[in-house]
Image (cartoon, rainbow, N blue to C red):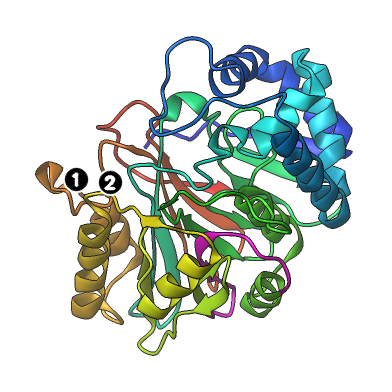
Amino acid sequence: MEKEKVMVLSGKPEEAGRKYGQLMKEKIRENVAVLIERKGIEIIEGVNDVPLNDKEFIKWEKEQEKILREIAPYLIDEMGGIAEGAGVDYRYILLLNLRAWQYRVYFPETTGCSSFAITLKDRTVACTGALDDPYEIYCGPVHIVPESGYRFISFPITGTVWGNRGMNSEGLAVGISSQLLRNLRPLPGIINQDIAIRVILQNLSTVKEVRDFCKKHPFAMNILCVDRNSNIFCAHQTLGGLFEIPVTEGYCALTNHIVDDGLMYLLMEKGVDKFFETDTTRLRRGNLLEFARRYNGKCTGKDVMDFIEDRKGGSPSAICNKGTIVLTYANPEPYPDTFWINYLGGDKEKRGFSPVKI
């Protein structure tokens, strides 16, 4: 089994950021050119030009930076270090981190992302799933060893300080998937979802803490967490508030659609006038739930990893699909310091999870 290459960033925020910027200089500049300046080949569909001089956009940008300074000022320092290390204007790094290329299409329109929790035969709970997006804009696994907070592993877009699916040294495993909502203008007080996940991974250790954070800080993401006591948190965190999905049988699954009709109507009142679903989101969730109904409480970790890796001959219900960048697996109760990764990148045939110590 090939050992995964993991970039380690440690020390004070500005120092970690500077190292990041230096190591990934060319790719950061490429992301700025493609995503912010809109130069070169467009590799993400359904996004907008960034209106850098628009008054409303600048107002939104400043509000987002203010929120960021309030909830995680250390990330401002880290972004400053990235800008310095890569030789890029700080504003462009900030805009990368704010998903400015999706200012008018506020939430991503990607092929997917799937998150899954299931009870194993030893009665502990596994957290697994897939990150689907264009691999060209990502930098691979990153191991953050912060000056303050918990160590964690995640998968940011190159040039960002984001959290994504990941796990921290306290045994908190996080899975996410985008809510694909079109025609929603940015609303006051809504924090960037990727920044929210970074804050969770670096600072929180239990499902209860994640639930409390989500109640306090509005963002938009389908989120699934498992902690080292095998507690499960499964929810739509949305502009309408926190809508937790009851976990009564020891398993849950989230892809990219909203499963609560009442929540959809509430979001329409908030400004959403069109819902978008990929062709596969319900098929993928159905695949996860079918596996859970058959094997919940009866399967091993290897069974789950084999299932997540199964391409199913290219079936649209497969969790590992043509858009998948990375597959992850965690079993926090017996293994609170180990995160299993299969980073495919552009290699869509790669198989085999590698354990990585956090």
Quarter of the rendering containing residue 248? bottom left
As for residue 226 lying within the magenta part, the answer is yes
Dot 1: within a 10 Å radius of its alpha carbon, few (fewer than 14), some, or many (20 or more) residues? some
Q: Amino acid at mark 2?
A: Cys
Magenta-drawn segment: 216-231
Q: CA distance from mark 2 to mark 1?
A: 6 Å
Q: Is residue 276 visible?
A: yes
Q: Amino acid at mark 1?
A: Arg
Left or right of 253? Residue 197 is right
Which residue is under mark 2?
A: 320
Label 2 SS:
loop
Percent coordinates x, y for residue 62 in the rendering: 81, 41
Left or right of 71? Residue 161 is left
The image shows residue 223, relative to residue 73, as above or below, that is below
Percent coordinates x, y for residue 55 in the rendering: 75, 33
As for residue 197 lying within the magenta part, the answer is no
Which residue is under mark 1?
A: 311
Question: 140 or 284, which lies in front?
Answer: 284
Percent coordinates x, y for residue 302 in the rendering: 31, 60
